[in-house]
Image (cartoon, rainbow, N blue to C red):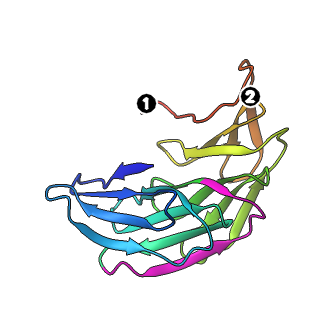
Amino acid sequence: SAAFSPDGKKVVTASMDRPAQLWDAASGKCLHTFEGYGGNVLFGAFSPDGKQVVTASTAGTTKLWDVASGECSHTIQGHRGCVFSAAFSPDGKKVVTASMDRPAQLWDAASGKCLHTFEGYGGNVLFGAFSPDGKQVVTASTAGTTKLWDVASGECSHTIQGHRGCVFSAAFSPD
């Protein structure tokens, strides 16, 4: 995966060669290499303020990185399988992870504590994202379902069905 920082000046990339990397978007120069995984890094995303990067790996870990120093500030552990994606909430205080071990999980970004486990899938959860107001999470699964979750309670508010195959991603409209 690849993603721009909120100001468009940096890019984070995740690849099958294990480390994630941070790049200067104007020059293409590598600024930091985020290492220390026992597996490949599948996904990277910036915090809303652009000061942190979250990465997801095949080793079942999610890491938060300081953009300025390139140092790992937290390692989130709790999945038993590959973590496919991770995303910050709009206020940067929470992280949602989607995993091969079926549940998606909601984490406190500062402490790494699990706040909610979103369960009830017939397959792996491939993707998770926050609504623009941060009150909901949408998840996509290999079971062909998309679910909407209430961030405060951790309860599923809606299950969207209709795909016959994997749902790889989902997104909220800005409004």
**Residue 175 horizontal/vertical position (percent):** 43, 30
> What amino acid type should be assigned to the residue bearing mark 1?
Asp
Pick the residue in front: 156 or 124: 124
**Residue 22 horizontal/vertical position (percent):** 33, 65
Q: Nearer the viewer, mark 2 or mark 1?
A: 2
The correct choice, above or below, for 64 with respect to 146 in the image is: below
Location of mark 1 (residue): 175
Pick the residue in front: 7 or 137: 7
**Residue 1 horizontal/vertical position (percent):** 45, 49
| Crowdedness near tag 1: few (<14), some (14–19) or many (≥20) residues, C-alpha within 10 Å | few
Q: Is residue 73 magenta?
A: yes
For the point 36% across and 78% down, which residue is it?
70
- Magenta-highlighted residues: 69-84
For the point 52% across and 57% down, which residue is it?
16
Dividing the picture into quadrants, the one containing residue 77 is bottom right
The answer to whether residue 51 is left or right of residue 118 is left
Closer to the chain start, of discs 2 and 1, is 2
Pick the residue in front: 156 or 43: 43
Dividing the picture into quadrants, the one containing residue 94 is bottom right
- How far separated are the C-alphas under marks 2 and 1? 25 Å
For the point 53% across and 49% down, which residue is it?
134
Query: Farthest left residue?
Result: 27
Residue 144 is labelled as: 2
The correct choice, above or below, for 68 with respect to 167 in the image is: below
